[in-house]
Every structure is written in C-alpha cells, then in structure tokens.
Amino acid sequence: MTQTEALDVLKTGANVFLTGEPGAGKTHTLNAYITYLREHGIDAAVTASTGIAATHIGGMTIHAWSGIGIKDSLSPYDLEQIATRERVAKRVAQAKVLVIDEISMLDARTFGMVDQVLRAVRRSREPFGGMQVVLVGDFFQLPPIGRSTETQFAFMSPLWHELGLMSCYLHEQYRQSDDSLTGLLGSLRNGTVDESVYDVLESCKETSFQDGIEPTRLYTHNADVDRINGERLARLSGTARTFAMESRGARALVEGLKKSCLSPETLELKIGAVVICTKNNFDVGYVNGTLGQVVKYEEKTGYPVIETFDGEELVIAPASWSVTEGDAVLAEVTQVPLRLAWAITVHKSQGMSLDAAEIDLSNAFEYGQGYVALSRVRSLSGLLLRGCNQRALEVHPHVRKYDGNFKEQSEAACAAFAEMSESERQKMHEQFIKASGGTLERKEIETRPARGADKTSTYEKTRLLLASGQTIADIARARGMSAETIVGHVYRLAEEGKIAAGDIKHLTFEQEQLDAIMAMVEKVGGTEKLAPIYYGLKEAYSYNDIRLLLAINLILTR
C-alpha cells in the first residue's frame, strides 16, 4: 500500500494498523494525517508507547495520557480514581482520534488497561470508547518490556480483533536504496537467514569509510555509549561550549520530555566533535539521524555550525519538543537538536536514518535488536560491523507468524478501496469529519518557530519550492506537510499576487477542467464556499483539485 492509499483509509475514520518496514514512511504518513485532522478541527490524541517515540511525534506517552501511569493492573477503585480526574476525563472525552505510535513496544496488558479507562470515561461499551484508533509501528522492531516471561504483543490481545483494525502495510522504501541491504533485512523478517546472509555480514566487517567520515557507533548497552562519548570529547583540544535546555509548562510533563528527548539537558560541544541531529528540519536541510562534525560557531548567535558528510555547512539553531493537547502546548523543552554521536544505543537509534554506522551486536540480548540496528543505515557501504551474535539475527517467532496476515489484510483493503470511485471515498471522508464535529472547510495550521529558528514565513517557503520547479507532492514531502496544506498555501499566495505564471508552468492540468470549474463558480456565485462547486460538478473533482485549479486561474488571469 502506498502512503496516499493509507491516508485515504485513515480519512474514513476506520480503525487502522499502519505498518511497514523501517524507512517505508510510517511517521511521514502519520504526521500528514495528524495535520489533516487539525486542519479540519478534529481533536486527535497523539501518544506513543515510549517517551522517546512520543518526542518524535510531539505527543505524550499513552501511559500519561490515559492516566494509568506505571500501574500494571487496574482495580475497580483505580479505574474510578482515574476516570474522575478532571484533566484525564476531559482529554479522553474530547478526543475523537487516538494515535499510539511504536505499538510494538506496548504489551497486551497495558493495551487492555487503556481500553478499560476509555470505556469508563466515555461511558461506552465499544472498544476504546468508540473513538478512531490508529496504531503505528513495526512488530519486527523492539518488543515490549514486560514483567511476564512470555512476551504478549498488543496483537495477541482479543481487543486487537474487537477493534476491527484495517491493516495498511506500506511497501515503498525511502531509507534504503541498496538492494543487498534490503535483501538482508528481508531475510531477517522472513526467517530465511542462510550462508548468503552471513557472507554479506562478513563483508561488512571490512568496510572502510572515506577520510573525514566518522561513523556513529551503535551498542546494545548504555555503559559502552557513555564511556566512548566521554573519552572522545575529552581528547579534543579547545574550550568546550555548553548549551542548556530551556523548558516551560507542567513540571511532570517537562521532566518526561527531558528524559525522552534525544538531545541532552546539558549539551557540551567542542570544535571537532562528531554529532548527530535529533530532529527533522527539512527547510535547513537535516533530519533526525544526519551526521556531522562541529566546525565552528555562528558569529552572531553562537549556535554550532556542523559540516555534514556531503560537505554542506548547516547552522543548528535551537528547536523545541513539546507535549500538546489539541491546540494547547502543555509542556515544551528547547535545546540545540544535537547529541554527541561517536556512539549511541540501539534503543535510542530507533526512528533514525544513519549515513554511516559502526555496529557491535556481539552482546545483543533481545529479539529485534539486530534488525533495528542494521535497518538504521541507508546502504551497506555505510555499515561497519564489529561483531554479531546469533540473537542479533533473530526476530520474534510470533511476529513472523502474524506478519503474513497483516500483509494479506492490507492487500484486501487496498483492493476494496481501489474499486471505489473518488467521490465515494470523498463522501466517506466528509462523513467522518462531520461525525467527529469537524469542519469541511480547512483552517490553516501555523506552528510557532523555535527560538532562533528561520523566520521565513511558511507561505514563502512553499513559494520558493514551487518556483524551483517542484510539484505539489514534492513540496509536501520536503516540508513534511499534507498536499492539502501546500495547496492552501498556493491559493493564498495566488490571492495575494505573489506567484507568477512562470512559477507554475510545470504544473499539469486540463484546460477543460479549469473551464468547467470556472463555469460552476459563475453559476454558484463565487468561491466563498467550495461545497456548492464540488456538488455542482457532481463530485467529479476533489476539494483539493478545485482549490488548486482556482489558484491556477487566479495566477493566469492577473
């Protein structure tokens, strides 16, 4: 299933399990859907199974959001206490969609406890109180940490089946471009590790990097990571500069963000330090996992300047991680989005894409640990393997058994949606928006820039990319936004006369489509509302197509 197809399913309000191999675009698709919900005024609770995962998506842990905290069971008294807490009750009652990221690390018991709380607060017998549930993750990655000797994945809970989840198994690959690496990871997933796999791994022990490229070292234990980073920083001459994290908001949530943020509370750097970016910033040109070396500090601001392995110099201004609820920011921490990267743990690397990595899996102790580590790199040329034990090549047998079912369910869903017309799908999307109390007319979502961040307006960034010849889909991907948002930018820029005809010459459209839309605009008396145009044209065009063609008309007729 493609990302676009998965978004189509999500927008219907169906309960969804969004999965796929590392690098398939799960987080990108999830963020596009969250943006879509907020643009239509639908309250989405964005949570994750771990604090680190929660910081990646700007949410809170499912444990904190649901009020269950560290409990491993719920008595009737516990349930009553949680359900009567004003803050918990309010956010659970208001949410129309619940997102749980990194579902692989949430055990079946905790999954059931969240369901208990939601049914109690929302006074509903339906699973999770009747809200849309979106579960995201890859069960081949790190499993849940539980007190039980037998791992109980969320998909082993009766709730999984009760929810009637539609599987959206993304098959596109945006991280790995190396067929040998893709084949290696496929062998681990399929349980077909043979001599050819060992030969590939053995060859990775001879990898050498170009001069100036310092790989990040991945280890399975924190002690190794702390020791190596401390030793390497101490070896560098020169004075260290310290960057302290700033925070605001509820104390407990701030403390949770500090522990989960991949950038340390106190970041100590020296010229020559090897660092890794801990956040995505497509506008500046780095992502979570970009490696570089500190080469200087910007004269005016004092922010570190890193040189990437592509030879590009980037100013790394402070960025923010926050816990949000609806449009409200409950807690926020701000720090330079870097950490020392001579070494990191496999656990902290989950979600990253690494340019170059030196990996030691000789002490791997958990299913999926080797799979996570090996899937961080983009190609085998960026992997130096120091050691590997048998456990590192194993994934949980339960996962492999169920994975085939998820693929089959995804193919069935894909086929069912392919048989629907666009107008049928659009009608389902609109019905969900209305049922959730949202608005069909989109509203612009502005994000507050972090201190020191680029102040170029979001509209201007879109205009520059459009003028450079990029398509709407290209711009949406580059900026981590939905296509609907980008079209909204183009429409507003067109209204303000800030786009020239030459800027859109690469956008393809049929003149007869534009003529049909403009004829309907004249018939309904203007463009103030899109719905009359949409229905007047018998739903032949999506709202997004109508808005884009209206923008193109404005540009061409000025």
Image (cartoon, rainbow, N blue to C red):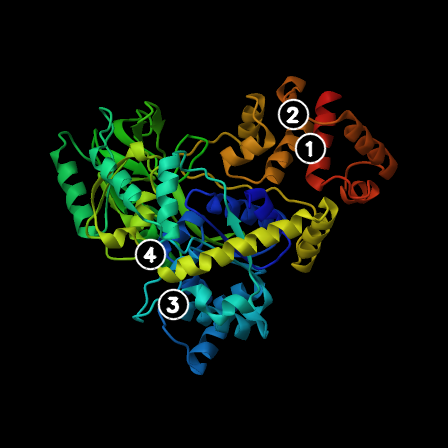
Question: Quadrant location of the C terminus?
Answer: top right
Whichever of callouts 4 and 2 sits on the residue coming sooner in the sequence is: 4
Of discs 1 and 4, which sits in the foreground? Answer: 1
For disc 4, the neighbor class at 10 Å (few under 14, some 14 to 19, many from 20) is some
Query: Label 4 belongs to which residue?
Result: 255
Q: Amino acid at mark 3?
A: Gln
Q: Are marks 4 and 2 in contact (CB under 8 Å)?
A: no
Q: Is residue 127 visible?
A: yes
- Residue 57: image location, x then y, percent: 45, 49
Looking at the rendered structure, the secondary structure element under dot 4 is: helix
Whichever of callouts 1 and 4 sits on the residue coming sooner in the sequence is: 4
Q: Residue at x 52, y 45 (%)?
A: 29
Query: Label 3 belongs to which residue?
Result: 152
- The image quarter containing residue 166 is bottom right
Of discs 3 and 4, which sits in the foreground? Answer: 3
- The image quarter containing residue 472 is top right
Q: Residue furthest bottom?
A: 76
Label 3, label 4: how many angstroms apart (C-alpha)?
A: 29 Å
Label 4, label 2: how many angstroms apart (C-alpha)?
A: 47 Å
Give the side of residue 10 with respect to residue 143, left or right: right
Label 3, label 2: how many angstroms apart (C-alpha)?
A: 50 Å
Whichever of callouts 3 and 4 sits on the residue coming sooner in the sequence is: 3
Q: Are marks 3 and 1 in contact (CB under 8 Å)?
A: no
Query: Label 2 belongs to which residue?
Result: 507
